[in-house]
Amino acid sequence: MPGGTGDPIGVAVHGAADGDIAARSPLAIFRARFRRDRVAMAALAVIALLIVVSIAAPLVTSVVGTPGPTVQDTSALDQVYGTPTGPSGAHPFGVDGNGHDIFTRILYGGRISLEVAIISTLLSMVIGVAVGMIAGYYRGWVDALLSRVIDVVLTFPILLLAIGIGSACAVNGCLRGAIQPGVGLVIFVIVISNWTYIARIIRGQVLSLREKEFVEASRSLGASDRRILTRDILPNLVVPIIIYGTLLIPQSILFEAALSFLGIGVQPDSPTWGAMISDATGSLDSAWWYVAFPGMALLVTVLAFNLLGDGLQDALDPRRTT
């Protein structure tokens, strides 16, 4: 029977050893499905390792013996031409044109990428879910107004919009100083671009859910709109929120890398994967390590989050019977 929270996965039964029928909770079904997906489990392990290594970047660099992210070791450069040198015992991933250790800057760049991606995704989800729920539930002029706002935002080319906002806010910030140049500016730009997609998805889900029997039952019992939205509809949106949130994180990582590649947002002295790849474009033929290692870090991170999102989508699919 449908209830206030619904059943996003379904309930399965299995035969116990004594022949009785035992029910499994939706959480147990999800865990069993997810654990059988070796690719998703491997992606989760990679993501966990990336998070731990990024958080413990100072400890890792001290153990490995590499200098800090802003230390310029000119003695590590080629003594004749002053060009970057490749991997060595002192610098496992080599150094860039300024003598920065690439291994250290990749670790600290992972910090920025994960911070920007996770925070911007959370903010995008909060705004998108709120707008989508209000538009889908109330319909009428409320839905028309919010849908037109979404359409207007979507008409702007994302990259050009990001460049415009980033350039306008790059010196003195925006919104009377509330948005300052740096990581905060990058997060603001990504949120402005991403919340609309979530809002459209949630709106479509709510338009269907508001006509379900359990919502009609709550409405007939005199439940307020706020209670229906928070107690009946929102729990049934957990699955799409988790799935699309997981898939939005790698998109945000790539967006941050693209903005850093263009020199927008994050300060020049801050190590980011996009900025490192941008700096390496002039020395691809002579310093392959300068672009290869940041590019590999970006590739592995984005791929891991995408595979995790696919695994979550499969494990939470209510149409699956096993």
Image (spheres, rainbow, N blue to C red):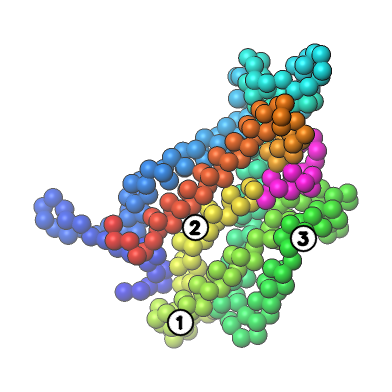
**Residue at 43% in and 83% down:** 216
Answer yes or no: do the residues labelled 2 and 3 have beta carbons within 8 Å?
no
Q: Residue under circle 1?
A: 211
199 relative to 182 in the view: left or right: left
115 relative to 238 in the view: left or right: right
- Give the amino acid type for the residue marked by disc 2 in the picture: Ile
Mark 2 to mark 3: distance in Å? Answer: 26 Å
The one nearer the camera, 311 or 276, is 276
User: In the figure, 315 relative to 106: above or below?
Assistant: below
Q: Residue under circle 2?
A: 243
Q: Which is closer to the viewer, label 2 or label 3?
A: 3
Q: In the rendering, which numbered label is found on residue 286? A: none
* Residue segment shown in magenta: 255-271
Where residue 309 appears, as percent x and y from the top left, is 48, 52
Q: Residue under circle 3?
A: 161
Q: Quadrant of residue 102?
A: top right
Q: Earlier in the sequence, mark 1 or mark 3?
A: 3
Q: Which quarter of the figure is the N terminus placed in?
A: bottom left
Mark 1 to mark 3: distance in Å? Answer: 37 Å
Where residue 301 appears, as percent x and y from the top left, is 56, 41
**Residue at 81% in and 50% down:** 180
Q: Which is closer to the viewer, label 1 or label 3?
A: 3
Where residue 228 appears, as percent x and y from the top left, is 50, 76
Magenta run includes residue 77: no
Answer yes or no: do the residues labelled 2 and 1 have beta carbons within 8 Å?
no
Where residue 154 appears, as percent x and y from the top left, is 69, 68
Q: Earlier in the sequence, mark 2 or mark 3?
A: 3
- Give the amino acid type for the residue marked by disc 1 in the picture: Glu
Q: Earlier in the sequence, mark 2 or mark 1?
A: 1
Instruction: Identify the element where label 2 is drawn.
Output: helix
Mark 2 to mark 1: distance in Å? Answer: 23 Å
